[in-house]
Amino acid sequence: MSIEFITLLALAVSFICLFYLRESDPKRRRAFHLAKWAKKRYVTTAWLLCLSPGALLLFMEYYSPFIMWSAALSLVGWALALPKPKNRSNT
């Protein structure tokens, strides 16, 4: 496997977990006047899954993909936090 593919795969797993955390965050939902999250939240599991690709990359001794993943993860996190949701409650 190429280094780029490994990095993108690790980043995709982390992106999905960060997206779930963003959508289920009660403070964000209150701030944007969205409906409460009706399902059970799995915050600890989501954080563990989000950070597990980094641990796996280090365990497999892929140091350059780990550095690229950790740098890209912060950018992806800020990019996910930036957009305001469309207010679906008032429509």
Image (cartoon, rainbow, N blue to C red):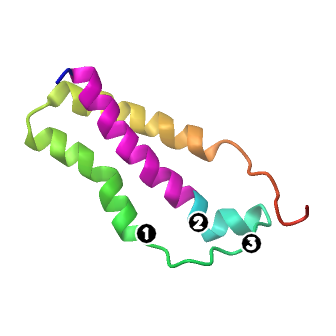
| Labels 2 and 1 touching (C-beta < 8 A) | no
User: Which residue in the rendered view is the most extreme toward the right?
Assistant: 91
Residue at coordinates 28% horizontally, 26% vertically from top-left? 5
Q: Is residue 7 above or below residue 51?
A: above
- Split into 4 quadrants, where in the image is the C terminus? bottom right
Look at the numbered disc 2 and give the secondary structure of its residue: loop
- Identity of the amino acid at label 3? Ala
Left or right of 42? Residue 86 is right
Q: Where residue 23 sits: x, y (%)?
A: 59, 59
Task: Please report contact status of discs 3 and 2: CB closer than 8 Å, yes or no.
Answer: no
Classified by dominant secondary structure, the portion drawn in magenta counts as: helix
**Amino acid type at image mark 1:** Val
> Vertically, is 37 above or below 3?
below
Kindly identify which numbered label has been placed on residue 56.
none
- Residue at (34, 30) in percent of width and height: 8
Residue 78 image offset from top left, x and y in percent: 55, 40
Of tags 3 and 2, the one toward the viewer is: 3
Instruction: Tell me which residue sits at (44%, 38%) in the image.
Output: 74
Which SS class for mark 1?
A: helix
Q: Which residue is mark 1?
A: 43
Q: Earlier in the sequence, mark 3 or mark 2?
A: 2
Q: Which residues are magenta?
A: 3-22
For label 2, the residue is: 25
Label 3 belongs to which residue?
Answer: 35
Q: Observer-nearest residue: 31 or 22?
A: 22
Marked residue nearer the N-terminal end (2 or 1): 2
Give the mark nearest the N terminus, 1 or 3. Answer: 3
Image coordinates of residue 18 in percent, x first then y, are 47, 52
Instruction: Based on the picture, tell me whether residue 4 belongs to the magenta stretch.
Output: yes
